[in-house]
Image (tube, grey):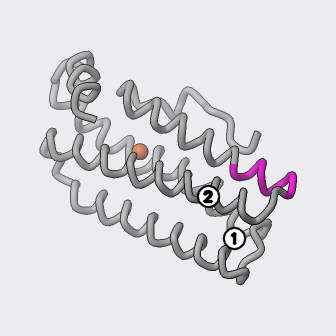
Amino acid sequence: MFIGWDFQYETGIKVIDSQHKRLVLLVNELHEAIVVGKTQSILESVFQTLMDYTAKHFSDEERLMLIYDYPEFKEHKDHHESLIREMEGLFFQFRMGELPVASLKVKKFLLNWVLEHIMDDDMRYVEYVDSTEIDSKFTDMLLEKIL
Ligand SMILES: [Fe+2]
């Protein structure tokens, strides 16, 4: 396993935690596919799945932040957009054969982005959501209905 799940990554918001776990799972799947030398088309499809799920996760988070009127919404959204652009850039180079998938650049990106995203960006909005004193069960219930 490339990235192990750790309790410190948990935000306490059920829907978000389960999406983060799925992201980690997809990163692990891609890494595993690289290590065992799967074919280019399989690698592309795993990479694509990871990108699609990332886009879904980011847009769900953006809705959550809007609902809570999060003051740093714009910065967080900008960060999402730059991560997506970076990921698309890697994917493009990879598909064009300009970047060997086993390159350190891909590994470094995969290792860092999910964890940085969770630990830096997400923990900030979670702190804000918690500080609104809206019951966390209510947050879970609300998100299950809208996401
Ligand atoms: Fe997140």
* Circle 1 residue: 105
Q: Nearer the viewer, mark 1 or mark 2?
A: 2
* Circle 2 residue: 47
Residue 97: x percent and y percent?
73, 80
Find ligand 1 in the image and state its quadrant.
Answer: top left
Three-letter residue code for mark 2: Phe
Quarter of the rendering containing residue 28: top right
Q: Which residue shows up at 39% across the image and 34% down it?
A: 16
Three-letter residue code for mark 1: Lys
Q: Which residue shows up at 37% across the image and 60% down it?
A: 80
Side of 59 relative to 84 (left or right): left
* Distance CA(mark 1)–CA(mark 2): 15 Å
Q: Which residue shows up at 47% across the image and 48% down it?
A: 53
Question: Reading the chain from its start, which is encountered first: label 1 or label 2?
Answer: 2
Q: Is mark 1 on a helix, strand or loop?
A: helix
Q: Which residue shows up at 47% across the image and 54% down it?
A: 52
Disc assigned to residue 24: none
Q: In this view, does 6 lie above or below 39?
A: above
Side of 135 relative to 37 (left or right): left
Residue 34 in the magenta stretch? The answer is yes
Residue 25: x percent and y percent?
62, 39
Q: Give the range drawn in magenta.
A: 30-37
Screen quadrant of the N terminus: top right
